[in-house]
Image (cartoon, rainbow, N blue to C red):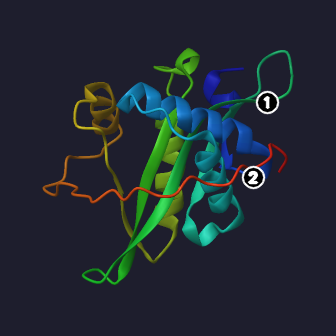
């Protein structure tokens, strides 16, 4: 069985909460050298899983040979932006992470293709966008290889300091 045959891209569920939290923390540390507050990250991830209007996580799973339990090797998060100019919605890809053992094997390409197919099948979706850390040359190359182009827009932000979240258990 080839990698493509054993790979499944699916919507994440609450059962994926631990993997999603672990992957997002690893991605932030690797790409931005930011150690995220685990409690806040877990609460934020769970909020998306429980309230799909906020977004939707997708995961890439492999079923290794011989048949065994699935192994989650990648993730991405979709969020939504309404465009009054187009009277349609952009899907934003965020929180992209592929486990280091599975990079350069087409995992992100498969996830991106699945999301693009989903978006094109929705009449109210006008495009896909993502933002990337300015110095992340590897990610930029990957995104260009799957057909994304740099935009003329730059992202500006005002990042507020939020109060420390209350602790949350590990049970879903």
State the SS at label 1: loop
**Circle nearer the N terminus (2, 1):** 2
Image point 41% across, 58% down: which residue? 92
Quarter of image, res 152:
bottom left
Answer above or below: position of 6 versus 160.
above
Q: Is residue 57 above or below residue 60?
A: below
Give whichever of 22, 86 is nearer the camera.
22
Q: Mark 2: which secondary structure?
A: loop
User: Which sits in the foreground, 160 or 55?
Assistant: 160
Closest to the observer: 82 or 156? 156
Splitting the image into 4 quarters, where does residue 31 fall?
Answer: top left
Q: Which residue bears the numbered disc 2?
A: 13
Instruction: Please provide percent x and percent y for residue 44.
Output: 60, 55
Q: Is residue 48 left or right of residue 98?
A: right
Residue at 59% x, 72% y: name it.
Answer: 53
In this view of the protein, can residue 31 be seen by the observer?
A: yes
- The residue located at (53%, 18%) in the rendering is 100
Residue farthest front in this picture: 163
**How many numbered marks does the figure carry?**
2
Neighbor class of circle 2 (other Cα within 10 Å; few <14, some 14-19, many 20+) is some
Mark 1, Cα crowd under 10 Å, few <14 / some 14-19 / many 20+, is some
Residue denoted by label 1: 70
**Residue 29 location in percent, x, y?**
45, 28
- For residue 39, which numbered disc appears in the image? none
Where residue 150 appears, as percent x and y from the top left, is 19, 47
Q: Nearer the viewer, residue 171 or 58?
A: 171
Place of residue 45 in the rendered image (x, y in percent of width and height, measured from the top left): 62, 52
């Amino acid at each position: 069985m080839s990698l493509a045959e054993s790979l499944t891209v699916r919507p994440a569920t609450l059962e994926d909460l631990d993997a999603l939290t672990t992957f997002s923390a690893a991605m932030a540390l690797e790409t931005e050298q930011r150690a995220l507050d685990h409690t806040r990250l877990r609460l934020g991830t769970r909020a998306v899983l429980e309230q799909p209007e906020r977004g939707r996580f997708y995961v890439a799973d492999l079923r290794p040979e011989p048949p065994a339990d699935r192994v989650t090797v990648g993730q991405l998060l979709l969020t939504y932006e309404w465009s009054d100019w187009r009277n349609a919605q952009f899907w934003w890809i965020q929180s992209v992470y592929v486990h280091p053992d599975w990079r350069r094997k087409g995992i992100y390409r498969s996830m991106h293709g699945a999301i693009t197919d989903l978006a094109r099948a929705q009449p109210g979706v006008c495009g896909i966008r993502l933002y990337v850390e300015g110095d992340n040359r590897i990610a930029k190359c990957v995104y260009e290889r799957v057909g994304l182009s740099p935009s003329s827009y730059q992202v500006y932000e005002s990042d507020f300091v939020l109060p420390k979240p209350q602790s949350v258990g590990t049970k879903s």
